Amino acid sequence: MRIFTVFCCLLLWSVNCRANEVIVSSPDGQVRVKLTIIDGEAFYGVIYKDRVFLENSPLGLVTNEGDFTSGLRYISSATGEIKDTYRQDRIKKSEVTYEANTLRFTMQNKAGRELSVVFRVSANDIAFRYELPAWESTRVCVIEKETTGFRFPAETTTFLSSMMTSMTGFGRTAPSYESGYAPDAPMEQNTSATGYVFPGLFRMGDRGWALVSETGVRSLYPASHLSAYQDGVYTVDYPTSDQNNGFGSTGAQLGLPGETPWRTITLGETLKPIVETTIPFDVVEPLYEPSRDYKYGRGTWSWIIWQDASMNYDDQVKYIDLAAAMNFEYILIDAWWDRDIGYDYMKKLINYAASKGVGVFLWYNSNGTFNDAPQTPMNKMNTSIARKKEMKWLKEAGVKGLKVDFFGGDKQETMRLYEDILSDANDYGLMIIFHGSTLPRGWERMYPNFVGSEAVLASEMLVFVQDTREKEAFYASLHPFIRNTVGSMEFGGVMLNDYLNRGNEKGQKRLTTDGFQLATSVLFQNPVQMFALTPDNLTGVPDFELDFLKGVPVTWDDTVFIDGYPGKYSIIARRHDKKWYVAGVNAEDKAKKLTLNLPMLAGKKVTLYNDSKNRETYRKEVKVSEKGELQVTVQSKGGFVIAL
């Protein structure tokens, strides 16, 4: 059930004739956005709780039909209110109420053409975009660049991940949003030539925090990122020309009237609004109806630990049996299945899985012309004719979903491919996971069969790279505040092998505890979780750990920030129906003793999964005080879960 009401007041603001200053505030009055035109240039600034969070920051577009960065003059402004209540089953909350005040600020350039910037300001959140009318006889334009910027106070430090260099990495598949983070870095250090991916987290000393991102990107626009820090400001950058092997425009081909995606800013004195925000979904709408009732859940996949050699019929049977033993809903059968198992035997595997109550996801290479990745099946997803033929077979065979890998960049051409795959898959009742991919930007609400993207330094790098294993806890402590707070994150984790290989005897040693691994099943949010268990774990792991994973949910009705600091530790609570889970990890070198404030569990007996000093994971029953307090010691590179 969805209720949506817009009250458009259409009231003109009083305007300062010299500076053309207009202000819009949040319903609670705590957030104020000021728009000005100074010497022909447009700016906005942000004040939160009477403290400056963004100094005058530039606004504007450059198009092939006109320049909207200089020579601007104020035309008009109009305000309104939005009240929106919606349900969403694949994000951090299932029921959302969104209330915002709106402002449409219209400007005119030297040629007499108009451009509006529309702001929606709610408690702790700002969303804004440009809206372009049809200009005289002009019905199309190309947006070549934006001057949209973010000018933070001088004391600001950053938590940013660099944009990967195009056409590098495995099979020339970059960029794929798989770089690390530099925590608490001064802005002057942010000199990456490639810029920084969304979202970006900023700490303004004792003023508070800001998270910057974008949402609502689809086939009508490229995805963007943050530029390097230059002249005191970060700006919105479009993809570079060498993405997608040089194919496709770097800007946006836009039909008029048209609009850009939303740029979003979440503000808070603490990290609580950052963790709990739903702004990526509040300002977008579903693009089509689901063709069936999609079922979310947990799954197994052999490739992550057993790798390519496991892509055979017998090993996949073992993993199907593992999924059935764990009460998991799915198995993911990864690359090379078409070559090493074949379509005919795959049908037998799918039928065998169905007899065990397990659904099948199959892996596909996205490529056609824009990468060199050799894994197959390939050339099945990149054109409409091939895609629909393949999806017809998949539906008839009983496949439930696809994992499509290796995308080539953020150009509008690639955004169109993402949307085409999702739309066609829905016609055939298939869910979609994207890997080697861009950040999802509101897609959980826009596309009903979208069930996650990687877009993170994920579990496969734990297998391949020692440095990533050493920093596993560090990255895990960041994701709830940055990457995972704006969209589903298909990490593919929960590794319970001591060594991340099939023999489990030597080699890639896991450096985190079992308690840490259990915690990430709650800490990381994604509606379809492919866990990195192996058949050996059924006998080599304590039963209570397996029992926990047999019952852990993948969809959530509420998410609450409890404590943490990005790069050090992270603790959040999630609720599924009436049951609460509290999960935390510690990235620091020493054990951390914490007193948790858990009002939702006050006076209740709960189950604690935690690590002892010798790093053995245990389970015990504890009681939360009547004040809602509970003391927990979290070991270095360890973690815990509290379950009601």
Image: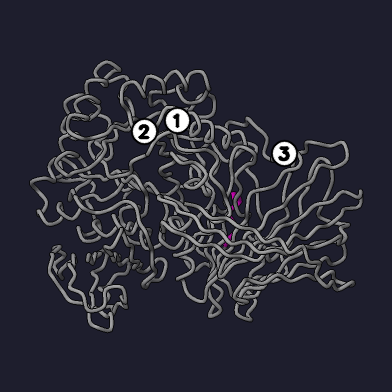
Q: What is the residue that sits farthest to the top in this orientation?
A: 344
Q: Amino acid at mark 3?
A: Leu
Q: What is the residue that sits farthest to the bottom in this orientation?
A: 627
Give the residue displayed 44% in from the left and 41% down from the top: 450
Residue ID for mark 1? 425
Q: Amino acid at mark 1?
A: Ala
Q: Is residue 610 left or right of residue 363?
A: left
Residues rendered magenta in the picture: 190-195
Q: What is the residue that sits farthest to the right in this orientation?
A: 111
Q: CA distance from mark 2 to mark 1?
A: 8 Å
Which of the two labelled residues, at mark 3 and mark 2, occupies the earlier sequence position?
3
Secondary structure under tag 3 reads: strand
Q: CA distance from mark 1 to mark 3?
A: 25 Å
Secondary structure under tag 2 reads: strand
Say above or below: 38 vs 380. Answer: below
Which of the two labelled residues, at mark 1 and mark 3, occupies the earlier sequence position?
3
Where residue 407 appears, as percent x and y from the top left, is 49, 35
Q: Is residue 251 left or right of residue 15?
A: left
Where residue 466 appears, as percent x and y from the top left, is 31, 50
Whether residue 538 is in magenta: the answer is no
Give the residue displayed 63% in from the left and 30% down from the top: 247
Query: How many numbered badges does the structure rendering display?
Result: 3
Where residue 643 appears, as percent x and y from the top left, is 22, 64
Residue ID for mark 2? 401
Q: Nearer the viewer, residue 622 or 208?
A: 622
Residue ID for mark 3? 254
Q: Do labels 1 and 3 touch, CB within 8 Å?
A: no
Mark 2 crowd level (few <14, some 14–19, many ≥20, 10 Å Cα)? many
Q: Do labels 3 and 2 touch, CB within 8 Å?
A: no
